Image: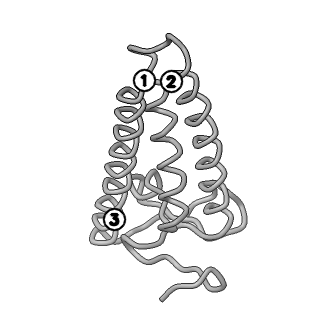
Amino acid sequence: MRHLDNPQYIPGVCNIGPAEIAVRRKVGWIGAASTVFLGAMFVYSDIGGIWLLLLFFSSVISAVGFIQGIMHFCAAFGLRSVFNFGSEVGRTDTVTQAEFRAQDRKKAWQILAYSVLVGLSVTLTTYLVK
């Protein structure tokens, strides 16, 4: 099993190291704070309708951040066939093997699907509570 003490690229499993994971967690918290604020605003005001899309997008952003941090896998990197375990955020290396790229794309789409499901759940729950 992998440890953050010795992170390494594992196709379809792990494509980011500690620096990138920290960024994903930060995005998750920012998205969560926005989601709580927007959710409260929608529940306790007359705002609704199309504006609930803001809640959907903020909850998807939060879910994407947290899921990527937990899974040690960046969906965007997986779709772009790159990885990063360095201390410099955003600097990437290329995945060269076709089989590895396919595994990474599959994992990336799973993360995005889970995140959309979270966004739909949060938005629907908020709509029903209102």
Residue type (three-letter) at the residue carrying disc 2:
Val
Disc 1 marks a residue whose amino acid type is Lys
Residue 43: mark in rendering: 2
Circle nearer the N terminus (1, 2): 2
Q: In this view, does 114 lie above or below 106?
A: above
Q: Residue furthest right?
A: 87
- Image position, residue 92 (x, y; %): 57, 60
User: Horizontally, is 103 left or right of 83 in the view?
Assistant: left
- The Cα–Cα distance between marks 1 and 2, rounded to whole angstroms, is 5 Å
> Residues under labels 1 and 3: Cα distance?
44 Å
What's the mark number on residue 23?
A: none
Query: Label 3 is placed on what type of residue?
Result: Arg
Residue identifier under label 3? 101
Q: Position of residue 121 (x, y in %)?
A: 35, 41
Q: How crowded is mark 1: few (under 14 residues within 10 Å), some or many (20 or more)?
A: some
State the SS at label 1.
Answer: loop
Q: Residues under labels 3 and 2: Cα distance? A: 43 Å
- Helix, strand, or loop for circle 3? helix
- Residue at 55% from the left image edge and 62% from the top image edge: 69
Q: In which quarter of the image is residue 127?
A: top left
Residue pictured at 58% horizontal, 41% vertical: 31
